[in-house]
Each structure stands twice: as C-alpha cells, then as structure tokens.
Image (cartoon, rainbow, N blue to C red):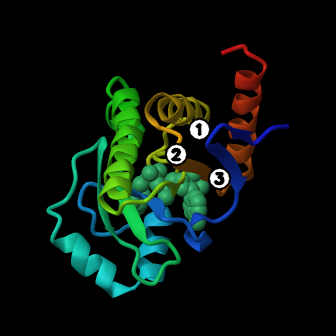
Amino acid sequence: MKNIINNIEIIHGDLTKMNLDIIVNAANHTLLGGGGIDGIIHYKAGPELLEECKKLNGCEIGSAKMTDGYKLPCKKIIHACGPMYYANKVDAPNKLKNCYRKCIELAEKYRIENNLKTITIGFPCISTGIYHYPKDEACKIAIDTIRECTNMNIKVKFVCYDELDYKLYINYFNEINKGVL
Ligand code: AR6
C-alpha cells in the first residue's frame, strides 16, 4: 500500500490538529460556520475567525476564500464551499473540481506573496459529509483534480477522518500506481 505519490500524501487523521501551513475547511456559502468540520474549525480557532469571515461576504459554490488560522496550529484556513450533491447532481462534479482548483490557486498565491519555497496544505473530503456527495466519486475528483492543478512547491495532504474515506483514497492511489489510470 502506497500513500504518497510525488507531492501528494494520504493520511488517516484529524485535520484540525495538524500543523500545516494551510488547512481547508468544508464550509458553506455564508462562510459563517456550521456543523461537521466547519463547526470544529470555528470552535477551535476561536471567535476571531467568525469576525474575519463576516467581512468576506460569503462565497460562491465551487469557490473558496482564505482567512488566518487564529488558535488552530495552521497559519491559514481556506474555506471552500462545495456543492450539495442532491441540489444539482449534474453541476456537482464541476463545482467540486472548482473547489479544489481554487484552493490550490489561493495556496500558490499565498506561497508566492510570502516568498516561501514550499508550503503544505491539508484537505478534508469536501462535500462528502452533510452535503452527501458519494464518497467514491468525490475521492476520484479530489485526487484527479489535485494531480492536474498542483505543482511540486505545494505539498498536498488528503486528511481522511473516516476510515472508509482513507481506504477509498488508498485504493485509488494503488490503481494509479499500477498504471491503470
Ligand atoms: N478532519 C478531517 N476531516 C474531517 C474532520 C476532521 N477533524 N471532521 C470531519 N471530517 P462535512 P460537507 C470530514 O459534513 O459535506 C457544515 O455544516 C468528514 O468525515 O464537514 O462539505 C458546513 O457549514 C467528511 O468526510 O462537510 C456546510 O453547511 C468531510 O470532513 C456543510 O456542513 C466533510 O464533511 C458542508 O458539508
């Protein structure tokens, strides 16, 4: 079993405990908090995070915005607004892809602006909890999109909280390694 391909790694764990440059939040269009990982991130970061989020005027579905990390161990948080799967199944794949692309775009901008040689960014499995995106499809979109749009200066970690997600990600990595894809 291989959990690293180039600069992309799969981890089974809690993203909110990780000491990365950037963590991605699975947020909603208001950016004002909610349940799931969003709730944990706001709780752990503290009330200053909500104050900054209030100034962002929300976020389009399929896009993302960046804030400070406040009391979390990360430096920055990218709040990505994934699609609600059953709201529009036809549009959902593109919206989910765009989320991952926008996160990498924001991470690269942050890296360049801060003169950093490399940065680390951790992703949860966006939209696969409360937003009910089928986990296997979301896993393929996440990995394929990141492989397409990232560069070697960005170290990407997919941090799977659920064991099922972790297994799906590892299995897909193994297929890629076998040269099937
Ligand atoms: N570390 C890593 N992944 C986690 C963690 C963690 N600590 N906790 C949960 N996950 P969800 P969504 C995983 O429901 O589906 C909120 O109300 C979880 O196992 O948090 O995008 C927002 O405000 C799942 O795989 O986000 C929105 O309204 C993944 O994070 C809505 O939920 C995403 O699950 C967004 O729904």
- In this view of the protein, can residue 86 be seen by the observer? no
Above or below 56: residue 162 = above
The residue drawn where x is 78% and y is 19% is 178
Relative vertical location of residue 53 with respect to residue 133 in this rendering, above or below: below
Mark 2 and mark 1 in contact (Cβ < 8 Å)? yes
Q: Return the mark for residue 128.
A: 2
Would residue 84 be visible to someone looking at this image? yes
Q: Position of residue 43 (x, y in %)?
A: 45, 81
Residue 31, given in percent of the width and then of the height, sits at: 27, 63
- The residue under label 3 is 160
Which numbered tag is attached to residue 163? none
- Which image quadrant: the N terminus? top right
Residue type at mark 2 is Thr
Q: Nearer the viewer, mark 3 or mark 2?
A: 3
Does the beta carbon of the residue at mark 2 sit less than 8 Å from ligand 1? yes
User: What amino acid is labelled 3 in the image?
Assistant: Cys
Upstream in the sequence, badge 1 or badge 2? 2
